[in-house]
Amino acid sequence: MRTDKPVDAGSARAMENYREFLNLKSNDPALRARAMRRLGDLNLEASEIERGEREQSSADALQSGEAIKLYTALLESYPEYRQSDGVLYQLARAYESNGQPEQALDALDRLVSRFGSSALIDEAQFRRGEILFSAKRYQGGRTRLRGSHPARPSVHLLRAEPLQARLVAVQAGA
């Protein structure tokens, strides 16, 4: 790990400790899952701090890439992890941070389809809308958002609808 990163010494040491713990191959799945989650979060945080101070660099991509690997491994290794909705949300953020909006959108789609009652649904829907709007996929975004809850099409879209209507109006030149 580079020492000139804007990660404080405490965070850098914590990241190193989590890496060392994961290398020990502990037999406690709950502890491994928590360590993977926390190390992913720390890498994502470091990546975002660094990006805030300068344009994305290869070092920044390495940290968000490590977060992506950790979150993906966590979801694959512990499919019943009780905070998988949060991991999917963080995975989407890491993909966005790494300049991979389609993969971010896929992670958010998984969150919405698997965890419809998550406290993160509104934020996930908003992020989905932002990604689709940035890609100028206005109508596709509307269809995709509606299709996420076919049995309850408006439950989690109420807050997103006014924003979505404004975005469609802007696109149409209204």
Image: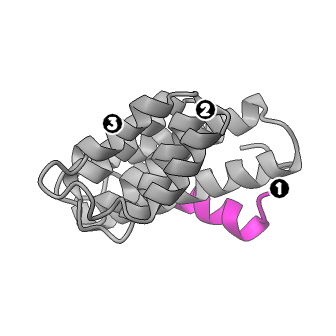
Answer yes or no: do the residues labelled 1 and 3 have beta carbons within 8 Å? no
Badge 2 element:
helix
What's the residue at 48%, 40% (across, down)?
68
Q: Amino acid at mark 1?
A: Pro
Residue 134: % across, % down: 61, 34
The amino acid marked with disc number 3 is: Thr
Q: Is residue 12 left or right of residue 76?
A: right
**Residue type, mark 2 in image:** Ala
The residue where tag 2 is placed is 172
Location of mark 1 (residue) = 6
Res. 62 in view = no
Q: Is residue 156 left or right of residue 20?
A: left
Among the two numbered marks 3 and 2 on one chain, the one whose residue lies closer to the N terminus: 3
Q: Are marks 1 and 2 in contact (CB under 8 Å)?
A: no
Q: Judge by depth and name the residue closer to the eye, 19 or 53.
A: 53
Disc assigned to residue 143: 3
